Image (cartoon, rainbow, N blue to C red):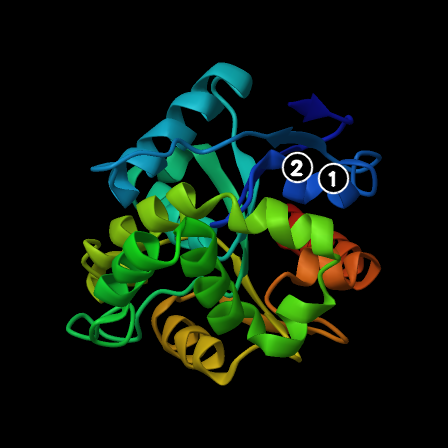
Amino acid sequence: MRRGSGPPALLVHGAAADHGTWTLQLHGLDDAFSLIAYDRRVGQGITTEDHADDAAALLAREVPGGRAIVIASSYGGVVSLELACRAPEQVAALILCEPPLPPGEYVPSAPAGYGCHFDRLIATAGGERAAEMFLRSVLGDGGFQAIPGRYRRDLCAMWPQIRSDMFSLGSYRVDHARLAAIPHPVLLLAGDRSPPFLATCLDALSAVLPRARRGVIPRAGHAMHIDNHRAFRDAVLAFAAAVAAERDD
């Protein structure tokens, strides 16, 4: 989906989501950007590198010869960092909402046994129950309960994508030397109500990325682009303006 006019911006969703997660941005940032939202692939064996290559191919079609600001949520942020490593000429800047990248090269992406427990729940209680466990772990119990019932059911029905992304992240090797070579300005956003482990991920990225800066979205959790979309919009616009000013100097 493409909407709006202005500099191109690619929207990369996280797990338990599709391009529809960006609905508020598609109608709130379209006066400032030409927004490109798409659905990442789902399936066994798809890697983070595959997702990054898909994003690069999409940008080559939609922004031939140009560069885009990449705005990404959760695991989409990991995909976007890999995109910046593989195709830096296609990226102008990165705005990342709590990418759950492990803080070290030998640190697992999830607690020991988490993936096995997820699969056991699929087998014994159904995929929707496994998805609920995952969503509670990243949104918190309060954040999960705050989602209206119909939308909770829709999110839990996306358990195949959650599983696909979870194992893609689990097989991804963190390489701090590659991340340290990313030349782009990066805004790392946190929700002030997000689980503490996500702040640890951001701390590690802040220490590695040479042009990283931090921001906090108030009254928001991991789904900050939904929880407080106005504050999120303001943060995106302020960062884009700062990047433009730096480029003009």
Q: Nearer the viewer, residue 213 or 215?
A: 215
What residue occupies the far front of the structure in this picture?
A: 124
| Left or right position of 182 against 153 | left
| Left or right position of 178 against 207 | left
Amino acid found under the numbered disc labelled 1: Thr
Q: Which mark is residue 183?
A: none
What residue occupies the far bottom of the structure in this picture?
A: 196
Give yes or no for contact between labels 1 and 2 (Cβ–Cβ under 8 Å).
yes
Whether residue 211 can be seen here: no
Q: Nearer the viewer, residue 116 or 7?
A: 116
Above or below 225: residue 199: below
Say what secondary structure mark 2 lies in: helix
Say what secondary structure mark 1 lies in: helix
Task: Give the residue at x 62% y 49%.
Answer: 153
Q: Which mark is residue 20?
A: 2
Task: Give the residue at x 39% y 22%.
Answer: 57
Q: Which residue is mark 1?
A: 23
Above or below 140: residue 151: above
Between the C-alphas of marks 1 and 2, the distance is: 5 Å
Amino acid found under the numbered disc labelled 2: Gly
